[in-house]
Amino acid sequence: MIQRTVRLMAVVLLGAILTACVAPAVAPAGQQPAGTELAAATGEKKSLDLWFNGDELFNKYNDKIIAAFQAANPDIEIVYSPYSNEAYKTNLQVAIGSDDPPDIFFNWAGDDTARFAREGNLLDLTPYSAQYKWGDQLSPAMLAAFTVGDKLYGTPYSQEAKYFYYHKDMFDQMGLKVPETFDELLALCTTVSKAGVTPLAFGNQERWEGVHYLTIFNQKVVGEATIAKDYSLSNDADKLFTDPGYVEAFNRLKTMQAAGCFGDAVNSTTPDAALIQFVNKQTAMYYQGTWIIGSLKDNGLEGQYGMFRMPPMTDAGAKGNQNFVLAGPVGLEISNKTKYPAEAAKFLDFYVSQSSQAALLEDTNRIPVRTDAVDKEKAPAGVVAVAEDLGKGEGTAMWLDVVLENSISEVYLNSIQEVLAGTKTPEQAVQAVREQALKIQESLKK
């Protein structure tokens, strides 16, 4: 899906039609915040814009949740606007500081949330968290990811993580085993490539698939202590992004390319096309997020694929904790300019209720943030395996383009494409990142 700035609107039926045509999928959750007058008492219809970065499967889920919420709250209308990934990021950046931002919107934890909070664009959800007792229901770690200072600015609903998916039958036919080290992964790629099969699907047209590789490589090679200082721009200027591990992280990506891990034209391949390649067994593996589990099930691959994390790097040059997972929570936030903060918070509470979270797992196979929503006896094996595996990790490497200041992440995103295309060296890529980081660091001092 090529980046575009055209707003992709979904048609939302009004509450009366929804009540007649769509059966509520989940039960109402939460109570009306104290001191809030019900719109029904005055006859007022309160409309809330909801912006989302969602695929077709998730849009169907959201339509169902919105229908159920409106059926239970006929005085509130949710106007749903889904976007493709890159279009969403672009439009939200423009809208969030405008006079007419969306009332409720999807966002990532990390700098995307912290920046909006620093700029005064987010509603403080701390009072509503106490009102609805989110602290007793949702994962403490996920809530912490949306906390800036002592205030909560987002309500997490899912944790997304990154894994290698592989076709079990293809591995069996080629006599392959799950790699236990990064070097074994490289050797596996070479073996599969020599057999005339593309080892890994890779769609970097939208740039974010590439940045996921660099996210985990930076953590494993540079180390979490150093990247924490550099990503937050708190390192000394003469040290900022100077660790040689940053260049080496790019070199590891080049090493994978040289080992034949990827097919041709990865920068012109979309993530959707890469998924199709994997589903059709044109590739043996796909390094992708847990959000594709539902698509794999829909394509008849449930139980036919395995999963493993990016393997540990065992050489002396890898200074990071090798038991980190590549993951990050996602959630909903509210603009501080909304006319209806209490009603918006009520929708957030409905969205993370036990019944909504159970439906999230059932309908999309996304990982919920509340344990009472996961029935291990009924949940797909892949989802249960991910939930258990995430609990074994000793830390989380969050998406690079989420934790970095936006203009710095843009340099990273573009540089990864250029390094893969051979038009920029790893050294030049890191230098470009450092120069932009220094500019932003200096601007923050003013």
Image: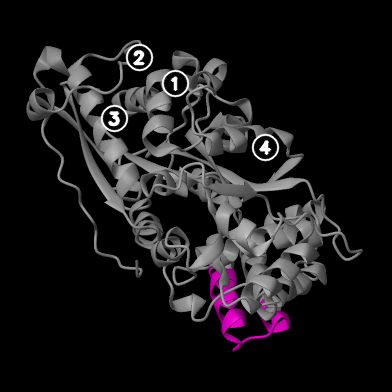
Compare residues 190 and 55 and report the one nearer the observer: 190
Identity, as a three-letter code, of the amino acid under mark 3: Ile
The residue that disc 1 covers is 128
Number of numbered callouts drawn: 4
Q: Residues within 10 Å of mark 4 (few under 14, many from 20)?
A: few
The residue that disc 4 covers is 389
Determine the image quadrant of residue 78.
Answer: top left
Identity, as a three-letter code, of the amino acid under mark 1: Tyr
Which one is in front in this view, the residue at disc 4 or the one at disc 2?
4
Circles 1 and 3: CB atoms closer than 8 Å: no
**Which residues are the magenta region?**
410-429
Q: Residue at x 65, y 73 (%)?
A: 433
Identity, as a three-letter code, of the amino acid under mark 4: Asp
Which one is in front in this view, the residue at disc 3 or the one at disc 4?
4
The residue that disc 2 covers is 33
Q: CA distance from mark 1 to mark 3?
A: 20 Å
Position of the C terminus by quadrant = bottom right
The residue that disc 3 covers is 65
Position of the N terminus by quadrant = bottom left
Q: Residues within 10 Å of mark 1 (few under 14, many from 20)?
A: some
* Percent of width and height locating residue 428: 69, 83
Q: Secondary structure at mark 2?
A: loop
- Compared across the picture, whether 429 is left or right of 167 comes to right
Outermost residue to the front: 173
The prevailing secondary structure element of the residues shown in magenta is helix
**Which badge, 2 or 3, is on the more N-terminal residue?**
2
- Compared across the picture, whether 223 is left or right of 54 comes to right
